[in-house]
Each structure stands twice: as structure tokens, then as C-alpha cells.
Image: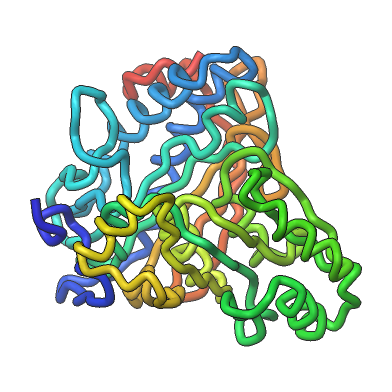
């Protein structure tokens, strides 16, 4: 299947649909992430990450089909197989304009949810059709992300210590106060050593780098930068959010072995190219919604009440620059009358 058929675009290209969104669909999308988060939250701490993920996927798909859009999943669960996931190329929405690309992670942090750990979220991003970077066989990407203050300062081609110094100068703080989130992986041993050598505070996480990337551009989270190798699909979702927040994402595709390198080269991907925020999401009208499943630096997780639950979400639109934090109270008895979703 071609990249166009999958709803993505060839590397380094992209054309926006003439039927661009004319309303703030982020307010529609938050219903989607709320449903997924509430469904996944039933599995917090139960040690069953597959059940948590499936619950989030099922709820997300059900609500997505009610959203007024002609959507195609560009970032999903890969090619369709026997697993009932939101897969690349899947048509979603009610079929009405606008025509849009969709990137989803119904539950970013399946293991975090299963173990009751922080920073699990449900997240979705939307942009004009043909404007999202299609990762193809690129599973991983080396990334650096930050907020508006450091957007013109950081450079993925510079040494980690140099980026700490640049970020510190841009923010008007000493390097010792710069906090950098890094996935706790063996591949990052030298990166962590270099960052600590520059005086930075390194915040290691076990999974899920979308929430920290967004947190790096959101005031008051205590996160200044995200650095290191993580998932390419997550990089596209993060770029969508950072575009709304005025932040920056830079990335370089990171093949794990020679076979993967050859596949990327054969598919036309330039492994030396630095992918910018606009390379990853070129659309002018980008929408992102995320809802907390477990509490973390970005969002509070689902909290249960006698009648239902309380959730916290962040919704944003790039064109207007509007960012909203939404606290929602959900009455399960009423919701389950018409939603067909088991929330408890």
C-alpha cells in the first residue's frame, strides 16, 4: 500500500486539503480522549497492560466515529491485522468535511497504567489531510524538544552539554536548573552522563515520551527539555502539540540495525536530515487533545467519585494559539445509558 493510501505523505512533502477545518475540533477531540482515559483507568495498577490498552482503543474508536470529520489514521497501530486496534489507513469520523490526518495513542503508557505509575495519557492529534509525516519503517527517532523560550536556541546536531547551556541562557537560568527528561534505556548512558556533566538535572522515565515533550513547552511543569531516542510515531504526535504551544521538536531517524537502515534508505528517507516541527506536521491548523490517565507532570489522572470520576485534559489549536485545561466531572450512570462504554 502506498504512503498516500495510508493517509500519510512521502518524506519531505505534503499538501494541505482545500477543505481546511473552520472550527475548533479540539473541543470535539477531548470527548474522545476522555472516553479512552476513563476506560483505561479501570485497569490502573492491575498489572494487565493489554486489557488497559484494549479498553482505551475500544472507547476511542466508538467516540471518534461521532466526530464531524473525514479522518484517516496516519499514526496508529501499524498495518491492520487481526488485532482490533486503530490502524494506519483506517477511516474514522462521520465522513463529513474537513478531510484530516489523525495521529492517535489511545493509551500512551500501557505499562505505566498497569503498574499504577505516573504520566500515562490518552492523546490524539489532527491536521489537514496530507500534512503529517508518515514514519513508514522508521520505528525510532533521536529527538530534542522544548518550549517557546528555547525554540531558537536548541539544535539536535549540537552536543548535549551545549544544548543545556543554550537552553539555560535562553531561559535566563543557570545550567544547574535545567531539567531534562530522558527515557531510562541503556542506549542513553552516554547522553545521561553528558547531561549530568553539564550540570543538568536528568529526570529518567520508564515509558512514554509524549507527555514529557508537551510538558517541556507548558509552564509550571518543571520540565525544560526532552532528549534522546524514542518512538517516531510519538515524535509526530509531540510535534503537533508543540506546534500549538509554540515549542520546537527536532528529530533524526534512528535505525536500530542495518536491515532497518536499508529499508529506510530504499523507501526514500534521508537519515541525515534534521526533521523540524513543521516537517513532522506541516499543516497550519493543528488540533491536539490529551487526557490524563495517571497523574504526572502534565496532567492529573482520573480520580473516582461516588457518582463517577473527574478527569483533566489539555486541548489546543495551532491557528489561534488557544490552549485550554478542562476539568470534567463524569456521571457514569448517565454516560452509560447512551455511550455503550463500560466505565466501571
Residue pictured at 69% horizontal, 65% vertical? 225
Horizontal placement of 283 versus 329: left or right? Answer: left
Residue 17 in the image: x percent, y percent?
Answer: 17, 72
Which of the two residues, 90 or 226, is positioned nearer the viewer here?
226
Which quadrant of the view contains residue 35?
top left
Which quadrant of the view contains residue 15?
bottom left
Residue pictured at 61% horizontal, 54% vertical? 325
Residue pictured at 65% horizontal, 40% vertical? 119
The correct choice, above or below, for 340 with respect to 287 in the image is above
Residue 125 in the image: x percent, y percent?
Answer: 39, 55
The correct choice, above or below, for 332 with respect to 121 in the image is above
Horizontal placement of 41 versus 63: left or right? Answer: right
Q: Residue furthest front?
A: 258
Camera sees residue 137 = yes
Residue pictured at 84% horizontal, 59% vertical? 201
The correct choice, above or below, for 79 with respect to 9 in the image is above
Camera sees residue 27 = no
Residue 312 in the image: x percent, y percent?
Answer: 61, 42
Residue 134 in the image: x percent, y percent?
Answer: 28, 60
Which of the two residues, 63 or 113, is positioned nearer the viewer here?
113
The correct choice, above or below, for 138 with respect to 168 in the image is above
Which of the two residues, 112 or 267, is positioned nearer the viewer here?
267
Horizontal placement of 21 versus 258: left or right? Answer: left
Horizontal placement of 229 versus 287: left or right? Answer: right
Which quadrant of the view contains residue 336?
top left
Specify the color scheme. rainbow
Amino acid at each position: 500500500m502506498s504512503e498516500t493510501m495510508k493517509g500519510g505523505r512521502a518524506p519531505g512533502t505534503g499538501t494541505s486539503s482545500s477543505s481546511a477545518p473552520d472550527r475548533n475540533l479540539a473541543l470535539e477531540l477531548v470527548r474522545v480522549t476522555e472516553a479512552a482515559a476513563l476506560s483505561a483507568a479501570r485497569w490502573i495498577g492491575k498489572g494487565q497492560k493489554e486489557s488497559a490498552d484494549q479498553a482505551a482503543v475500544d472507547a476511542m474508536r466508538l467516540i471518534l466515529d461521532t466526530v464531524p470529520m473525514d479522518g484517516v489514521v496516519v499514526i496508529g497501530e501499524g498495518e491492520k491485522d487481526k488485532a482490533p486496534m486503530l490502524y494506519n489507513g483506517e477511516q474514522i469520523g462521520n465522513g463529513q468535511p474537513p478531510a484530516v490526518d489523525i495521529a492517535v495513542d489511545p493509551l500512551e503508557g500501557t505499562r505505566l497504567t498497569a503498574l499504577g505509575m505516573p504520566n500515562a495519557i490518552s492523546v490524539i492529534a489532527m491536521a489537514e489531510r496530507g500534512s503529517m509525516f508518515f514514519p513508514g519503517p522508521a520505528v525510532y527517532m533521536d529527538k530534542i524538544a522544548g518550549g517557546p523560550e528555547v525554540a531558537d536556541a536548541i539544535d539536535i546536531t549540537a552536543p548535549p552539554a551545549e544544548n543545556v547551556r543554550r537552553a539555560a541562557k535562553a531561559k535566563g537560568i543557570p545550567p544547574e536548573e535545567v531539567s531534562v527528561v530522558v527515557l531510562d534505556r541503556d542506549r542513553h548512558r552516554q547522553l545521561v552522563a553528558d547531561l549530568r556533566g553539564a550540570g543538568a538535572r536528568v529526570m529518567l522515565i520508564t515509558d512514554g515520551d509524549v507527555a514529557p515533550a508537551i510538558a517541556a513547552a507548558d509552564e509550571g511543569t518543571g520540565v525544560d527539555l526532552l532528549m534522546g531516542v524514542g518512538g517516531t510515531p510519538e515524535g509526530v504526535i509531540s510535534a503537533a502539540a508543540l506546534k500549538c504551544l509554540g515549542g520546537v521538536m527536532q528529530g533524526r531517524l534512528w535505525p536500530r540495525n542495518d536491515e532497518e537502515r536499508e529499508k529506510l534508505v530504499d523507501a526514500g528517507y534521508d537519515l541525515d536530515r534534521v526533521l523540524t516541527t513543521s516537517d513532522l506536521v506541516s499543516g497550519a491548523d493543528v488540533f491536539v487533545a490529551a487526557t490524563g490517565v495517571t497523574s504526572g507532570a502534565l496532567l492529573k489522572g482520573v480520580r473516582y467519585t461516588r457518582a463517577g470520576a473527574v478527569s483533566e485534559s489539555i486541548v489546543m489549536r495551532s491557528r489561534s494559539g488557544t490552549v485550554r485545561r478542562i476539568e470534567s466531572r463524569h456521571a457514569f450512570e448517565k454516560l452509560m445509558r447512551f455511550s455503550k462504554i463500560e466505565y466501571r
